Amino acid sequence: MDKILRVNMTDLSVKEEPYPEEWRLLGGRALTAKILLKEVDPECDPLGPDNKVIFAPGALSGSVVPTSGRMSVGAKSPLTDGIKEANSGGQAGQKLIRLGYRALIVEGKCKDPEKRHLIFINKNGVEIRECPELKGLRTYPASEKLGAQFSKRAAFMLCGPAGERGFQGASVAFTDEGPRHPSRHAARGGLGAAMGAKGLKAVVVDDEGGCRHGGQGIEGCRGRRRGNAAASGEDGG
């Protein structure tokens, strides 16, 4: 069953929720916007606890469809004060959905502004860890340290010192295949600042043992096409 993963940085709690059936064909930008419109006060401080940072793969992520592995990041923008989405390539989108998560929602804000945390997601569940060794690091050295801690299958999403300091132009960096350099960026709207303001330095996604083999989106589209073809007497194969 598809799920939404919700992490609260204020009390460091984790909750899984069933993915709404009516959102079955949503993913990426459409999904981040839907959640923001439903859950985030438009008057909230973009760097405050009431803003939410949402990571959502596309509806076809996890499948063999070309270019289907992009990840959308959504939040109220520190730069524009409006709903913002920026997206990136890299490994994380495919890996997150292979673990059954259609979205990761990060809400609240760390009570101690000097602390940094990472979220580790794998087949066994979700863990929030303090990561003082990553505080203030740029994304490349931070990725090197994460690479020494986690398996070669793990993908990283992280912000640099600009995000930690709330700079309005900060991006969210994503690692790519091979040496896992954080060379991909969701770079619009200052979403790295929204992430860093929560005390969140990195998200680590390790899909080893994950059994997800394609989004509901692609199966839903096939099912609707077959149903329409059957109703019209055509071959839906």
Image: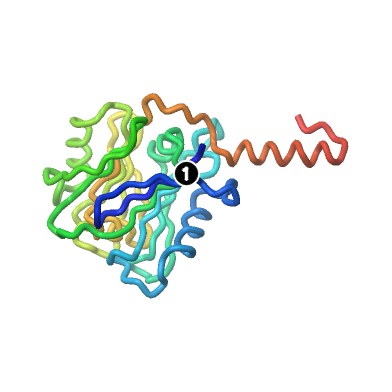
Q: Is residue 21 depicted above or below 96 in this figure?
A: below
Q: Is residue 113 depicted above or below 93 in this figure?
A: below
Q: Quadrant of residue 217?
A: top right
Residue farthest top in this picture: 209
Q: Is residue 34 depicted above or below 236 in this figure?
A: below
Q: Quadrant of residue 101?
A: top left
Whether residue 182 is visible: no
Residue 234 position within the rendered picture, expressed as x and y whole percent measured from the top left: 85, 35
Identify which residue, 53 or 49, lies in the foreground.
Answer: 49
> Residue at 14% of width from left, 51% of height from top?
136
> Residue at 58% of width from left, 47% of height from top?
21
Whether residue 3 is visible: yes
Residue 152 position within the rendered picture, expressed as x and y whole percent measured from the top left: 28, 26
The count of marks equals 1
Identify which residue, 54 or 29, lies in the foreground.
Answer: 54
> Residue at 46% of width from left, 36% of height from top?
100
Residue 139 position within the rendered picture, expressed as x and y whole percent measured from the top left: 22, 45
Residue farthest bottom in this picture: 43
Q: Is mark 1 on a helix, strand or loop?
A: strand
Residue at mark 1 = 102
Q: What residue type is labelled 1?
A: Arg
> Residue at 35% of width from left, 55% of height from top?
187
Q: In which quarter of the image is residue 84?
A: bottom left
Residue 137 position within the rendered picture, expressed as x and y whole percent measured from the top left: 15, 48
Q: Which quadrant is the C terminus positioned in?
A: top right
Crowd rating for badge 1 (residues with CA inside 10 Å; few <14, some 14–19, many 20+): many
